[in-house]
Amino acid sequence: MIKVQRVVLSSRPGENGHPSPDNFRVEETSLCTELKQGEVLVRTLYLSVDPYMRCRMNDDTGADYLLPWRLEECIDGGGVGVVEASKNTQLAISDIVTSFNWHWQTHDVIHGNCVQKVDPRMVDGHLSYVLGAVGMPGLTALLGVREKGHVTCGAGQTMVISGASGACGSLAGQIGRLDGCERVVGICGSDEKCRILVSQLGFTAAVNYKKGDISTALRGNCPNGVDVYFDNVGGPISDTVISQMNSGGHVILCGQISQYNKDVPYPPPLSEETREALRRKNITRDRFMVLNYMDKHKEGLELLSQWVKTGQIKVLETVANGIENMGVAFCSMMTGGNVGKQIVKISD
Ligand code: NDP
């Protein structure tokens, strides 16, 4: 038996409520480390907090592929860790493993079939990237752009990205640039984030949606209109972008975070004006789901790994420390406290 710390969901914010760190509770418990055949003991290195978790805080997630977190039970999500003991023939001590359903717990005993082995060379030893640029958010950016963006090198396209300074957005803009967009314009929530997008990530321009009139700022930065829109946020920001899109443009419907604290279906209904703009200008707006492209994940991760290692893509992260800060980190990410991927470091 060893003592471990874990995080349980202690209350729900309500479908129309804002999540608070008080919804989470850290507790100590005992873990039996006697392994059955096939099991491994893992120590958690990094945990991920992601916007989709907001719907797991509700009784009903509204999505058939996501189960609600249960009250008073240990929370799970993306995680990466190291094998400390093994009774699995495929996994040895010191192997690095990851899973989408990692418990928010400092150590765990899991069946080897429930984790995927990670080659640390894919991330140059930077293991948190497994949860970000060379993981699910990286694939979301890459496959979102490639499957739904219709980017054509040399066509002089302008791409706009909302939620541009976050995990997916910061990568989507860089991928749009690498794939040949002429202008890549980000929308995000602070002047400092705007500065980082342009000076560090090579965005053409960035607009702070919390300051001034986005419509005017966007028009100034997209003089030829918008051809491709990577939409992470929805709501009024997206209405404004869509109103400035060119005929035959493409919306990559990645996420709608501005609506996640509301009891609305996904994707949330659009205003009649925006629906009419989409129809009139023959703009595609297909829902994108990274999990629908499992067959493209391996190749995608190899490309992302290559781009990161060669510096063609810059990776931004915000790292919180300690399992006791999981709830704080989640709520901070939901309100823009992060630049790049929000990670929580659990152990060295
Ligand atoms: P981020 O790292 O982008 O973090 C969330 C960001 O959203 C915050 O930093 C904040 O930045 C912004 N934000 C929060 N509230 C609002 C608001 N009301 N209006 C505008 N911006 C807001 O998260 P991810 O990169 O992990 O996720 C981005 C989006 O992609 C989410 O919508 C998520 O659901 C979606 N997603 C979709 C996937 C798919 O398969 N379709 C897979 C993974 C993610 P700021 O300071 O700019 O406000």
Image (cartoon, helix red, strand yellow):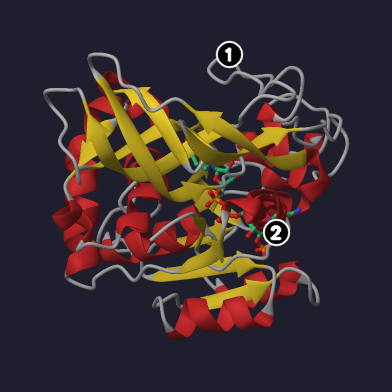
- Residue 203: which quarter of the image? bottom left
Name the N-terminal-most of marks 1 and 2: 1
Q: Which quarter of the rendered picture does the N terminus lie within?
A: top left
- Number of numbered labels in the structure image: 2
For image coordinates 27% across by 59% down, the residue present is 179
Amino acid tagged 1: Asp
- Residue 337 position (above or below residue 270): below
Packing grade of label 1 (10 A; few <14, some 14-19, many >=20) is few
- Residue 157 position (above or below residue 16): below
Q: Secondary structure at mark 2?
A: helix
- Residue 243 position (above or below residue 320): above
Residue 78: mark in rendering: none
Packing grade of label 2 (10 A; few <14, some 14-19, many >=20) is some
| Residue of label 2 | 332
**Foreground residue, 199 or 326?**
326
Q: Which quarter of the rendered picture does the C terminus lie within?
A: bottom left
> Can residue 20 be seen?
no
Q: Secondary structure at mark 1?
A: loop
Residue 329, image x and y in percent? 65, 56
> Can residue 345 be seen?
yes
- Residue 101 position (above or below residue 229): above
| Residue of label 1 | 64
- Residue 293: which quarter of the image? top left
Residue 299, image x and y in percent? 17, 40
Mark 1 vs mark 2, foreground winner is 2
For image coordinates 76% across by 25% down, the residue present is 58
Amino acid tagged 2: Ser
Q: Residue furthest front?
A: 1
Residue 3, image x and y in percent? 53, 39
Q: CA distance from mark 1 to mark 2?
A: 27 Å
